[in-house]
Image (cartoon, rainbow, N blue to C red):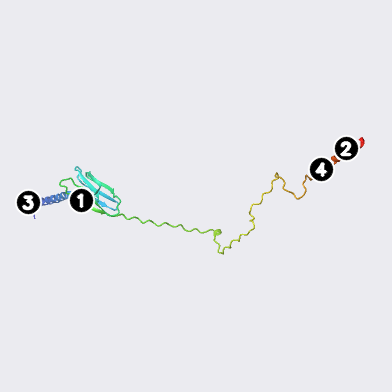
Amino acid sequence: MTIPRRSWRGAGALVAAAVVGLTGGVISAGPAVAHTPTWAVTCSEVTVDLTNYTSDVPNTVTVSVDGKDLLPTETFGREFHKKLALPDHDKPVTVRLVVKDADGEGKHSIDQTKTAEVCEEEPTPPPTEPAPSEPAPSQTPSTGTPEPSATPSDEPSESAPAAPAPSPSSPDLAETGSSSSTPVIGGAAVAVLLAGGGILWAVRKRRTAQG
């Protein structure tokens, strides 16, 4: 059976229309997924990643924490990537991201908020105690009862300093016996006595001769 040419033409038109319809659907779906805003919030930082935006228009991005600017309004083009450190906080805070798409009617602008929790402090490990060292054998404590200390006596201790010996140059102390100069003094006295006796004998002899 031969198919008329008109039928072939009709079928070709249908296929072409289907291809065009699919292509148009893909093209029309493209702008809906073109803009990709992604951001994440932890207890200590905020990460912002914006991609596939229109590059020749002034898109803007702003990040704030509890109403205070963490990132003042900044203009970007096709992409924007930044990581911001959160200020210290002891209670949960609210982080707000505002992105304004300047292309067309701004359908891809976003205004979202997320909560940053308080960071948990890492527990401080307990201090490690040094292992006790084994005492040396010579330092082993004695198990016997300590002996009581000796009663102090009135006698001087043997460790008391001895009296200093007399110096050879100092004058002799009083002696109980005779000194070495005693014979000299005695001899001098005898000589004086003898001389006196001789003088008396000479005087008497002269008086006898004159009488």
Q: Is residue 132 above or below residue 26?
A: below
> At numbered mark 2, what does the secondary structure look like: helix, strand or loop?
helix
The residue tagged 2 is: 203
Q: Residue 111, which numbered label?
A: 1
Front residue of this view, candidates 63 and 164: 164
**Quick check: 158 left or right of 6?**
right
The amino acid at mark 4 is Ala
Q: Residue at x 84, y 40 (%)?
A: 196
* Lower position in the chain sequence, tag 3 or tag 2: 3
Front residue of this view, candidates 157 and 17: 157
Mark 1 near mark 3, Cβ–Cβ under 8 Å?
A: no
| Residue 147 locus on image (x, y percent) | 58, 63
- Spatial CA distance of label 3 from label 2 is 210 Å
Front residue of this view, candidates 15 and 196: 196
| Residue 140 locus on image (x, y percent) | 54, 60
Quarter in which the C terminus is drawn: top right
Q: Residue 189, which numbered label?
A: 4
* Lower position in the chain sequence, tag 1 or tag 4: 1
* Lower position in the chain sequence, tag 1 or tag 2: 1
- Spatial CA distance of label 1 from label 2 is 162 Å
* Lower position in the chain sequence, tag 4 or tag 2: 4
The amino acid at mark 3 is Arg
Quarter in which the N terminus is drawn: bottom left
* Lower position in the chain sequence, tag 1 or tag 3: 3
* Lower position in the chain sequence, tag 4 or tag 3: 3
Q: Residue 6, which numbered label?
A: 3
The amino acid at mark 1 is Asp
